[in-house]
C-alpha cells in the first residue's frame, strides 16, 4: 500500500483535505525521524505544496542553516527557538515540517493553531528523554494528531531494535544536544545496563570526529579578535610612534 493511502496521509494536492492535520514522527535518536521528515516534506514538494521546514536554532551539530540527518542528508530550513517567532512566515505555506519538536516549548499550541488554519504540520521529535520520560510537552501532541508513529533504531550494544536513547556520562540536564559522542540507541535491556557493561566499540565515531573539529574551529574563532579591533590598535601604535 502506498503511503498516499495510509490513514492520516494525503500527499496529492487533488486529494488534499480542506482541513489541516498534525503528523507526529517519534523515536529515539538515530531512528530516522529527520530522514522521514525530509522524505515527507520532499514528497509534499513534488505534489506542489509549499513547504516550510523549521529547525531548532541551538542544534548546530551538522549544519547551521539546514535540517541534517546523522548520515548527512540536508534540507534548507528556517531556525528559531520559539515557534511563535516564525508564525509570520507561515501564511504562504501549506505544509510545515518541524525537526527536534521536543525542544520547542510552544510546539503543541503552534501545531494545533497551524492545523486549525488548514495546514499540514509534520513534527519529528524524541518522544522520551534519555531517562525514558516524556520529553517536555511533546506527548500532549498525541491526542491532537491525526497520525503518530514511533520509529526504532539499531541498538548499538546488541544490534536488536533500539527504541530508547541512552546517554553516556553523568550529565542530568535534559537538553544536551549531541550525536554519537553523547548518545546511543538502546533496546530495553541494554538501556538498563551499566555503561561499563556496554560494547562501546560498536558506537560509530564519525559523528564524534566531525563534532570535535567543529567545536575546535568554534573555539579558535571565539579566541580570534575581530579584525577591526586589531586595525584600531595598529592605528593607535602608528599615531603614538609619529607623535
Ligand atoms: P534521527 O533524526 O532519528 O536522530 P536521522 O534521520 O538523523 O535520525 O538519521 C538516521 C540515520 O542514522 C540512519 O539512516 C543511519 O544512517 C544512521 N545511524 C547511525 N546510528 C544508527 C543506529 N544505531 N540505528 C539506525 N541508524 C543509525
Ligand atoms: Mg533528527
Ligand atoms: Zn540491546
Image (cartoon, helix red, strand yellow):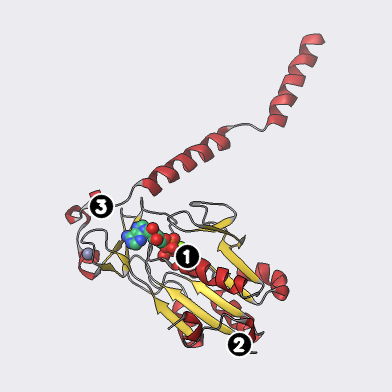
Residue shown at the point (51%, 68%) measured from the top left: 39
Q: Which residue is mark 3?
A: 202
Quadrant placement of the N terminus = bottom left
Mark 1 close to ligand 2, CB under 8 Å: yes
Which residue is labeled 1 in the image?
Answer: 34
Residue at 59% x, 81% y is 12
Q: Earlier in the sequence, mark 1 or mark 2?
A: 2
Looking at the image, is 176 positioned above or below residue 116? Answer: above
**Residue on which disc 2 sits:** 15
Rendered view: 47 above or below 160: below
Q: Provide the secondary structure element on which disc 3 rests.
A: helix
> Quarter holding the C terminus?
top right
Between marks 3 and 2 in the image, the one whose residue lies nearer the viewer: 2
Farthest residue to the top: give it.
242
Quick check: 1 above or below 237?
below
Q: CA distance from mark 1 to mark 2?
A: 25 Å
Cα separation, mark 3 vs mark 2, equals: 45 Å
User: What kind of element bears circle 2?
Assistant: helix
- The answer to whether residue 208 shows anywhere in this view is yes
Residue situated in front as seen by the camera: 121 or 86: 121
Judge left or right: residue 29 versus residue 73.
Answer: left
- Do the numbered discs 1 and 3 sit on residues whose CB atoms are within 8 Å? no
Comparing 38 with 242, the one in front is: 38
Amino acid at each position: 500500500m502506498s503511503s498516499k493511502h495510509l490513514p492520516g496521509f494525503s500527499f496529492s494536492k487533488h486529494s488534499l483535505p480542506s482541513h489541516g492535520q498534525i503528523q507526529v514522527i517519534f523515536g529515539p535518536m538515530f531512528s530516522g525521524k529527520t530522514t522521514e521528515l525530509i522524505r515527507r516534506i520532499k514528497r509534499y514538494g513534488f505534489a506542489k505544496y509549499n513547504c516550510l521546514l523549521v529547525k531548532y536554532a541551538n542544534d548546530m551539530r551538522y549544519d547551521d542553516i539546514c535540517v541534517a540527518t546523522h548520515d548527512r542528508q540536508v534540507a534548507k530550513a528556517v531556525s528559531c527557538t520559539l515557534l511563535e517567532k516564525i508564525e509570520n512566515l507561515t501564511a504562504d505555506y501549506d505544509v510545515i515540517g518541524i525537526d527536534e519538536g521536543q525542544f520547542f516549548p510552544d510546539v503543541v499550541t503552534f501545531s494545533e493553531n497551524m492545523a486549525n488554519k488548514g495546514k499540514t504540520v509534520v513534527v519529528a521529535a524524541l518522544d522520551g528523554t534519555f531517562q525514558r520520560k516524556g520529553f517536555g510537552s511533546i506527548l500532549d501532541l498525541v491526542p491532537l494528531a491525526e497520525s503518530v508513529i514511533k520509529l526504532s533504531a539499531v541498538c548499538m550494544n546488541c544490534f536488536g531494535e533500539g527504541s530508547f536513547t541512552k546517554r553516556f556520562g553523568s550529565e542530568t540536564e535534559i537538553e544536551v544536544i549531541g550525536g554519537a559522542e553523547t548518545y546511543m540507541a538502546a533496546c530495553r535491556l541494554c538501556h538498563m545496563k551499566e555503561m561499563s557493561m556496554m560494547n562501546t566499540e560498536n558506537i560509530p565515531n564519525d559523528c564524534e570526529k566531525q563534532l570535535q573539529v567543529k567545536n575546535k574551529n568554534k573555539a579558535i574563532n571565539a579566541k580570534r579578535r575581530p579584525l577591526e579591533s586589531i586595525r584600531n590598535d595598529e592605528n593607535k601604535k602608528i599615531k603614538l610612534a609619529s607623535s
